[in-house]
Image (cartoon, rainbow, N blue to C red):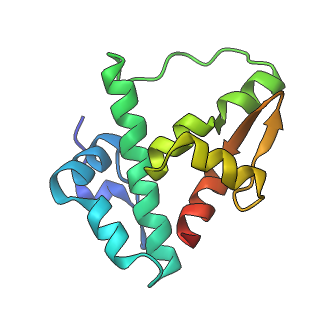
Amino acid sequence: MIRPAEQLVHQGAVAVIDGRVCHLLNKLVGLDKLRAQVRGQDAQLDQALLAIRLAGVAYDETASAGTVSAPPEEYVSRSNRQLNDTLSTTEAAALLRISRRAVSKECKQKRLAATLVGRNYRITRDDLAAYAARR
């Protein structure tokens, strides 16, 4: 269902953009290049461009899996939910476009906030966004 633009604007100054549109913006407009060019000029712009990127990547992952709608919510234990709400170093590396080893090093040196689960780091999307904004 395509919503009219007026329905995408909330509280006057906030727009909600679908993951599919974020994916298309990344692909067609080259927001990654733009994000690199304007990085550090405005923190809010950095975060907004990163959010569009993350939403586009999330859409791309679900679309490549063959589904665009989320499955019905199931009960998930707190520890499993916490793992699902975080990213692995491999996932973080893909989003940051650096190596997994570099992400692990940043976590180990405490430049990227992460939680050690067993022998693996888990990174929240908020911590990843904050790190990306500082880069």
Q: Residue lying at the far left in this picture: please name it.
A: 28
x 39%, y 26%: residue: 62
Residue 63 sits in which quadrant?
top left
What is the tally of numbered marks visible in this picture? 0
Is 66 on the left-hand or right-hand side of 94?
left
Residue 79 sits in which quadrant?
top right
**What x and y, as percent, mark residue 104?**
67, 45
Instruction: Examine the rendered structure and indicate whether residue 38 appears above or below residue 85.
Output: below
Instruction: Examine the rendered structure and indicate whether residue 124 appears above or below residue 90.
Output: below
Image quarter where the C terminus lies is bottom right
**What x and y, as percent, mark residue 59?**
37, 35
Is 129 on the left-hand or right-hand side of 39?
right
Is 133 on the left-hand or right-hand side of 17?
right
Image quarter where the N terminus lies is top left
Instruction: Examine the rendered structure and indicate whether residue 38 appears above or below residue 19.
Output: below
100 or 36: which is nearer to us?
A: 100
125 or 39: which is nearer to us?
A: 39
x 50%, y 44%: residue: 99
**What x and y, as percent, mark residue 132?**
54, 62
Instruction: Examine the rendered structure and indicate whether residue 5 appears above or below residue 24.
Output: below
**What x and y, as percent, mark residue 100?**
56, 40
The answer, for residue 10, to whether it is visible in the render is no
82 or 114: which is nearer to us?
A: 114
x 52%, y 78%: residue: 43
Is 37 on the left-hand or right-hand side of 51?
left
Residue 61 sits in which quadrant?
top left
Q: Residue lying at the far bottom in this picture: please name it.
A: 41
x 44%, y 85%: residue: 41
The answer, for residue 100, to whether it is visible in the render is yes
